[in-house]
Image (cartoon, rainbow, N blue to C red):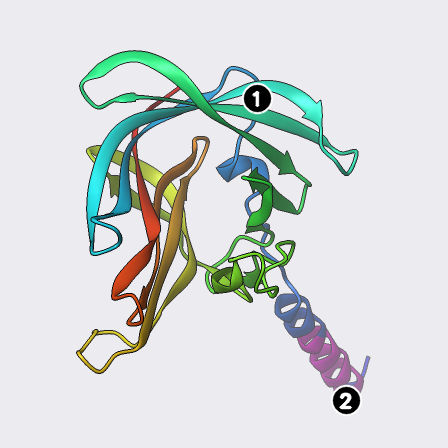
């Protein structure tokens, strides 16, 4: 082989290697990694619930313990395999668990859907990597003024701190992902001239092989016409799991 032919073949080989590297992909974590579902699995949280008081003049926080427990495998309303989850509640000082809500969770293979109060959220979606974004509330009819859900319109969920350690409450977790869902406000801070104000905060943290370990949600609106607030908030902080 002459020197020229050898040089040409060498260049072709180098280009092929470069192309191979440029198209190399790295596997994403699976939905099941961060949202494991099996009958009998439970997660216990401290729940801090923010509610309005004095006819909307102010807010106050009520604290409880809640337990989410996977009750049974079922079929959801789209005919897909899903799981029914019961929520139980009790005082922070302890006592008997009392059932107070039911949810439906579905792992579609590429996303994790969670139905709460008949609203279907896309909580997780592949690929799980920093800054990947999706419309997490796209199944919710939020544009009609009759639904009182306009604040949920067009939310962009996105990942950060993928596969990073975190401390939630007093528990140290090896691998977590943060799902940022919303953080915006209108007319804040409120002044004597403010006629309308609104604030929305929503973020969740999921831990590998556990599920959701933290949630912070807050939505409120202020109307000068009646000089009052409406809305609510919840913060879930992991206490225990199996």
Q: Which residues are magenta?
A: 3-15
Mark carried by residue 168: none
Is residue 242 rendered to the left or right of residue 83?
A: left
Front residue (pair 59, 41) = 59
Q: 5 or 179: which is nearer to us? A: 179
Q: Where residue 4 is drawn, which disc sits there?
A: 2
Q: Main secondary structure of the magenta part?
A: helix
Up-down relation of residue 30 to residue 202 (above or below)? above
Circle 1 Cα neighbour tier, 10 Å, few/some/many (<14 / 14–19 / ≥20): few
Write the residue at 77% across / 89% down: 4
Across and down, in percent, residue 96 comes to 31, 10
Residue 60, percent across and down?
19, 45
> Which quadrant: the C terminus?
top left
> Is 115 left, or right, of 174 in this rendering?
right
Q: Which of the two discs, 2 and 1, sits closer to the camera?
A: 1
Which badge, 2 or 1, comes first in the chain's sequence? 2
**Quarter of the image holding residue 87?**
top left
Residue identifier under label 1: 38
């Amino acid at each position: 082989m002459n020197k020229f032919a050898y040089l040409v073949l060498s260049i072709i080989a180098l280009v092929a290697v470069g192309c191979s590297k440029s198209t190399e992909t790295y596997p994403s974590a699976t939905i099941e990694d961060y949202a494991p579902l099996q009958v009998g699995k439970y997660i216990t949280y401290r729940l801090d619930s923010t509610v309005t008081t004095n006819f909307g003049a102010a807010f106050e926080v009520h604290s409880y313990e809640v337990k989410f427990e996977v009750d049974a495998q079922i079929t959801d309303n789209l005919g897909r395999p899903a799981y029914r989850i019961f929520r139980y509640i009790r005082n922070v000082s302890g006592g008997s668990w009392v059932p107070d809500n039911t949810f439906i969770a579905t792992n579609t293979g590429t996303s994790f859907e969670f139905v709460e109060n008949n609203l279907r959220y896309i909580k997780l979606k592949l690929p799980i990597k920093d800054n990947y974004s999706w419309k997490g509330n796209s199944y919710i009819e939020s544009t009609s003024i009759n639904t009182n859900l306009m604040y949920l319109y067009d939310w962009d969920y996105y990942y950060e701190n993928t596969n990073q350690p975190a401390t939630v409450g007093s528990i140290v977790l090896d691998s977590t992902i943060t799902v940022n869902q919303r953080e915006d406000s209108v007319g804040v801070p409120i002044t004597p001239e403010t006629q309308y104000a609104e604030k929305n905060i929503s973020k969740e943290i999921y831990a590998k092989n556990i599920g959701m370990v933290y949630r912070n949600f807050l939505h409120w609106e202020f109307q000068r016409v009646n000089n009052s607030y409406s809305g609510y908030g919840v913060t879930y902080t992991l206490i225990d799991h199996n």
